[in-house]
Amino acid sequence: MSHYASDSTVKALTVNDLAAMKQRNEKITCLTAYDASFSVLIDKAGIDMMLVGDSLGMVVQGHDTTLPVTINDMVYHARCVSNARRRAFVIADLPFMSYTTPVVAAQNAARLMQIGGAQMVKLEGPRFEIVSFLAGQGIPVCGHLGLLPQMINQLGGYKVQGKEPADAARIIADARQLQEAGAGMLVLECVPAALAKEISGQLSIPVIGIGAGVDCDGQVLVLYDMLDIGIIKRPRFSRNFMLDAESIEAAIHAYHKAVKLLQFPSSEHSF
Ligand code: KIV
């Protein structure tokens, strides 16, 4: 454990702290993180959560999709991030095909928590049985609905989800059922802002948006997109926070402040 991480004056955030933030209408800030150096910068800037996302398959490993990412990759990067964090809540993605059955999911989630140091695991789609089983084992779970990058070959492209009334109704029903199954948080990716607002209002758990409008309980962006250092074109819903910043630290601070003050995302970053 690093010297930075062992600072005992800083209290690590818990699921209860994040739930309380939703209760008092304080926006939750989150950025993806994949290594210890960025973990320190993000944590020092006061960002509430770090997501060790399987987006690392694209921005760190250079793949076209997140599909090649393995559970070993995720455990390694989660460990790097956790080693250096002291306050931010750490969530790690279960990658493609690592939650095919409840037992497989539990074994892989346990590795993310025991070796990777994650406090919560995230999985994509309406996988109620898996969520219920993990929650029953004491594993905090974050659901992920809307655009599901692990399903890209079925979806046929990175498109906004839930535009048709029937699709929107299905996403609302899935969100409610994930909460009932025991999910402690939900990520909504690339859905209309009005739909995300409806879901955030209906659920008691924090709803974190990415391309989902300003009315979610919190926001997450891929770090490399908002620092404009990605090898992939920045999506429309993201913003280059380096444009008006003198340093990476300043850009992360600006993102944190903009989310807390409801200045990001604006309508130009929403659908
Ligand atoms: O992998 C990731 O970075 C994610 C975010 C896009 C939410 O899941």
Image: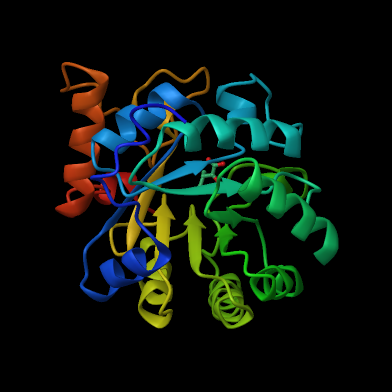
Residue shown at 26%/34% (left/top)? 44
Q: Is residue 100 above or below residue 258?
A: below
Q: Is residue 99 visible?
A: no
Name the side, left or right, on which 216 lies relative to 168.
left
User: x and y percent of residue 102 in the render?
Assistant: 81, 66
User: x and y percent of residue 33 in the render?
Assistant: 46, 33
User: x and y percent of residue 148 in the render?
Assistant: 63, 52
Name the side, left or right, on which 238 lies relative to 179.
left
User: x and y percent of residue 253 in the render?
Assistant: 20, 34
Q: How many marks?
A: 0
Residue shown at 68%/49% (left/top)? 94
Q: Is residue 217 visible?
A: yes
Q: Is residue 222 above or below residue 151?
A: above
Q: In which quadrant of the rendered image does the C terminus lie?
A: bottom left
Residue shown at 34%/64% (left/top)? 18
Colour basis: rainbow
Name the side, left or right, on which 101 lies relative to 146.
right
Residue shown at 36%/27% (left/top)? 3
Q: Nearer the viewer, residue 231 or 236?
A: 231
Q: Is residue 187 above or below residue 53?
A: below
Q: Nearer the viewer, residue 80 or 192?
A: 80
Name the side, left or right, on which 224 lies relative to 112.
left
